[in-house]
Image (cartoon, rainbow, N blue to C red):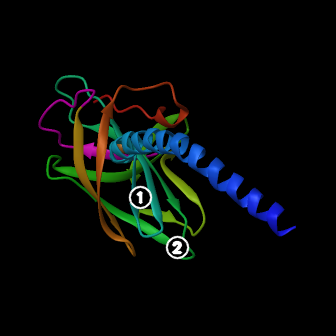
Amino acid sequence: MATEQATRINYRIGGMDGASCVSRIVNALTRNLIASLLFLLPVTALAHEFKAESLLIDHPKVIETPPGAKVAAGYLTVVNQGQADDRLVAIESAGIPRIEMHASKIIDGIASMKPMEGGLPLPAGKTVGLGEDGTHAMFMDLTKQLKEGEKIEAVLVFEKAGRVPVVFNVEKRSAQKNERHDHQQ
Ligand SMILES: [Cu+2]
């Protein structure tokens, strides 16, 4: 009984030696893979989402403008993963003279928009987007054309989460439903 156990232990140790060679190679490969993933992750995170306390800000973007245009529409999504309501009260950017949050409505066939009083409510546990129901961020008094591929540094100001730096990607207008609102002026 004791001998049998000893043999089994020896066998297992022998097995482990053989396996450790393989596992060393696998480990090296895994380390390389993890290293490349770690290298890629921050880039992806910077490009598409930002986190502040329990808020996840997904893909801030602004639609490119034709030459001479004074306004552009911006969109983003905020996931409030926390227990408390918050509110997006302002969007600021050193490169844009004025950014307002607008809600547009069609009344009697005429589209009109006005600033959202009090900003964008972010109820606990909910996902809310500027881009839903005619809402949008309006980049105003533009001094230069916004071109696809450019990035605009901005700060989202939340009632509770405070000031959160983000980057708006300048993108082409897509056929997405949240971009129906037209800003040709
Ligand atoms: Cu607007």
Compare residues 88 and 111 and report the one nearer the observer.
88
On screen, residue 16 above or below 169: below
Going 30% across and 43% down the picture, which residue do you hit? Answer: 168
Rendered image quadrant of residue 32: top left
Determine whether the residue tagged by mark 1 lies in a helix, strand or loop.
loop
54 w.r.t. 149: above or below: below
Task: Give the labeled residue for mark 1.
Answer: 116
Amino acid found under the numbered disc labelled 1: Met
Q: Quadrant of ligand 1?
A: top left
Foreground: 53 or 184?
Answer: 53
The quarter of the picture where residue 177 lies is top right
Please say if the residues under marks 2 and 1 sit with CB atoms less than 8 Å apart.
no
Q: Looking at the rendering, in which quadrant would you find the C terminus?
A: top left
Farthest-out residue, left: 143
* Residue located at (47% from left, 39% from top): 25
Q: In this picture, is 129 found above or below 82?
A: above
Q: Secondary structure at mark 2?
A: loop
| Eye-nearest disc, 2 or 1 | 2
Q: Residue at x 48, y 68 (%)?
A: 54
Asked if one can make out residue 129 in the rendered structure from this viewpoint, the answer is yes
Asked if residue 42 lies in the magenta stretch, the reply is no
| Span highlighted in magenta in the image | 135-149
The quadrant in which the N terminus is found is bottom right
Q: Amino acid at mark 2?
A: Asp
In the rendered image, residue 83, in percent from the top left (x then y), is placed at: 57, 76
Give percent across and percent down for residue 5: 80, 64
Residue 85 image label: 2
- Secondary structure mostly seen in magenta is loop
